Amino acid sequence: MGLLTFVCLVIISQGSFPYVYADTGYVYYAAIQETGLYGDEDGIWISLPFPFQYDNNTFDSIFVTTNGYITFSSNIVAPYPQNFPDPTLPNGIIAPLWKDFVVYSGGRVKTALYGYSPYRYFVIEWDSIYLYGGNPGHRYKFEVILFENGGDGDSLVFSYYMIPSNDSGWQAVCGLESLDGEGGVVYCYDGSPNPIFSGKSVIFHRVQVEDDCASLVILEPSSTRGTGEELVPFGAVMNYTSIPRGRFVHLDIRSFSNELLYHDSLLVTIPADSF
């Protein structure tokens, strides 16, 4: 019997950049295609195997760097991470772990394509890299997974295979930034609020947000359930405005590859400043 794990995608965004994130079940896909990236402060443009949506735009290529991030808007390789949002270039960043890395002595940056159209996913993996000026024995291995079909679009996962035990995201940023640098969502900056460690995966997804009404928490089911079990979901939706709002609340159940398995909607009226 299969299992379903339920998470609430929490809206934590700045500016008109309504992305959500949630810890998810750990998953890791090995990459085998060499990018040719090597050394320090290097970057390369890579063609995507499918169009990818990001910040209301569609892209067919990405700029991959040795420093643990990718971007759509520039070919700048920046060694020092900046908290999001920041209008200073580079912008439009997807950063599973932005730090000053080097790719030497067996380190590689690789890619891979999995799945079948229209539910393929593209992997960019930083394999066995280490910090500039750091101990070559302290290696990092992590990846970002871009999904072809994201429903509303823009779905991706950060996964961490190997993070040194003395580093939980120290002097690093993990998150997303808008193309203009005016919006962003941060999962971890300098180890807070969510530490990074081996065996962790985080999913990001773009949602449509109106009038500052947002899902807060899934109350039921509160734990993993078998796929054969019947259940009635309960959740809380918060209205952050000073006037009542009527809004549709949507329930989507998706596979890990983001294929929509079930959808339902309910119109609810939410009093001002309450849920």
Image (cartoon, rainbow, N blue to C red):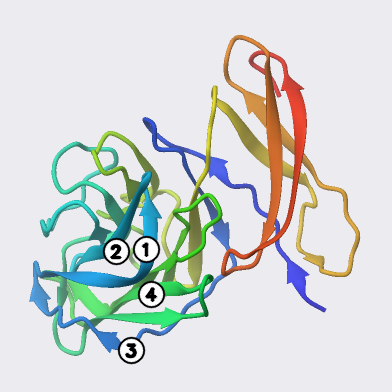
- How many other residues sit within 10 Å of disc 2, few (<14), some (14-19) or many (≥20)? few
Res 80 visible:
yes
Q: Which mark is residue 28?
A: none
Q: Which mark is residue 32?
A: 3
Query: Which amino acid type corresponds to the residue marked 2 in the rendered image?
Result: Asp
What is the CA distance from the residue labelled 2 to the residue labelled 1? 5 Å
143 to the left or right of 244 = left
Location of mark 4 (residue)? 123
- How many other residues sit within 10 Å of disc 1, few (<14), some (14-19) or many (≥20)? some
- How many other residues sit within 10 Å of disc 4, few (<14), some (14-19) or many (≥20)? many
Determine contact: label 2, label 1, CB under 8 Å: yes
Secondary structure type for disc 2 = strand
Query: Which amino acid type corresponds to the residue marked 1 in the rendered image?
Result: Pro
Q: Which mark is residue 60?
A: 2
Residue 206 percent location from the top left of the image: 48, 46
Query: Which amino acid type corresponds to the residue marked 4 in the rendered image?
Result: Val
Q: Nearer the viewer, residue 6 or 251?
A: 251
204 to the left or right of 33 = right
What is the CA distance from the residue labelled 1 to the residue labelled 4? 14 Å
Location of mark 1 (residue)? 51
Residue 151 percent location from the top left of the image: 56, 54
